[in-house]
Image (cartoon, grey):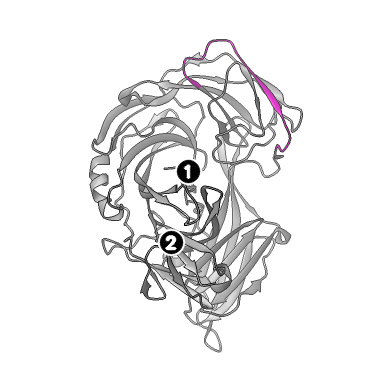
Amino acid sequence: MRAALALVFALAGCQLVFPLDGPGDGGTDLVQGRWLQDVAIEDGSGIPGLQEVPFSPDEVKLTVAFADTPAMPIDYNTDGTFSFTRPADARYRLALFHGGDVVELQSSADTIVYSTKRFGRLDATIVDQNTPVAIAVGTTPIGTPAIATTGVWMRIGNVAAPGTLDWRTTQPRNLLGVATEVSPDRDHVYYLEYAPDGALRSDQIVRSHLVEPVAITNGIGGSITAAPAVTSPNCSFQFKAPAADEATRILPIVPAGLSISADWNVQASPIASVDPAGIEIASQHGGATAATDVTASLAMFSPFPETELVASMSTFAKVPVKHPEALDATALIVGTTHFDKIGTTGSCMDTSVGNGVGLVDPEFELDDVIVSDGDVITRGAVTELDWDPIDATADDVYDVRLVEITASGPSTLLFERRRYLTTHDSILIAGEDLLPGRRYLAVVAGIRGMPAAGSGDFRTLAYPLGQSLQVSPSFAIQP
């Protein structure tokens, strides 16, 4: 599930309170907001923390538009606040630009709060040169080795030990997404071995070692020496994942003929209050079949002190997507993922994962016309894409990705062009974001577990937490 599109929870945090302004002169409202970075840090002893950091005004851009009006710039203040006026009670389209990323919040609330997630020190240097790192271990690995770091919060899997890896290019990574330098006095490095162990023969940490302080420098490299010790479980709990029930529930959103799979995992999440992403502690990918509910007593080990542990269950199918000029298809995910906290390292509690997140009907409309795969549409100044909750129960937020479908030789390639967050069951797409002759689809994630989003709080999460994923038919724009 996690390999499809990145999970959508770039949200949450503490509540921010603004004075509310009623309709002003001329039938306008004042909307006040704040946009900042939620940064996962550690305190020097490996214990994670959350730091709220505004952007520098010169590194971001904000615009706002109403209905089909042109976008207008908004000033961003050094404390992360901003404001704008709108026609009374009007829905607005607030676009936030940082680097090459853009997210558009479509809301009618008088206050708006959003955060961008960063899993690592803001001053960490990205590794962009060949950077050899020697891995030396005192024992023969009994499982699949991995390297995890805090401070820059990243994980490198499938490490050859002993051996040498290029810190710049080794994959896969999670959380931060890129390789960074490692500081000996600000980051902790862990050597981990994953092997089948415990209930359900899940892959989980069976040996671990906190590496002595190490420096890994861009273009120079470093070395990691480990003598992993056999672990004793420090987290034991009853785990229930109703995969069979969920597989039946999602049948109406899965195209006919596709098989449904399920998996689960437990991860150490440094900022679980704002994002469930974390470093994997235990998992079973594709092994927990959708035909079997999971009920187990699990005992596992987490090396990360005072770090919240989050359990999840994904039930999903892979939908093929193919450009007409390509020979090969790629795939996107439809289905659901449920998250729940199970405590912190050393103190776990029982959980039954699932919160009944709403499902999105596979039928979509563009400007009130049902869209079929391959339709060619004429764009307007604004094009409305809408959908319906399949069980007539709307989710708290919809996170929508506008994806362009292209062909490169025999391959179908997908590129996310814009992201939208809204409490409505539709989005407005500006005409300039739909280019003539191009082909698109939308990935819609319904999120349940953001109860204050209707009031403009696109940050605060509540557990249990769930998301459902649906993929629209593809459509082309009239040349």
- Per the image, label 1 sits on a secondary structure element best described as loop
Describe residue 405's horizontal placement relative to residue 395 as left or right: right
- Per the image, label 2 sits on a secondary structure element best described as loop
Describe residue 333's horizontal placement relative to residue 270 as left or right: left
User: Residue at the location (35% across, 60% down)?
Assistant: 395
Q: Where is residue 23 in the image (x, y as percent from the top left)?
A: 51, 82
391 or 112, which is in the foreground?
A: 391
411 or 308, which is in the foreground?
A: 411
Q: Position of residue 85 (x, y in %)?
A: 58, 78
User: Residue at the location (45% across, 48% down)?
Assistant: 329
User: Residue at the location (42% across, 60% down)?
Assistant: 398
- Residue 474 shows which numbered tag? 2
Query: What range of the chain is rendered magenta?
Result: 127-144
**Is-magenta flag for residue 370?**
no
Residue at numbered disc 1: 272
Quarter holding residue 185:
top right
Give, as a three-letter code, the residue at label 1: Ala
Of callouts 1 and 2, the N-terminal one: 1
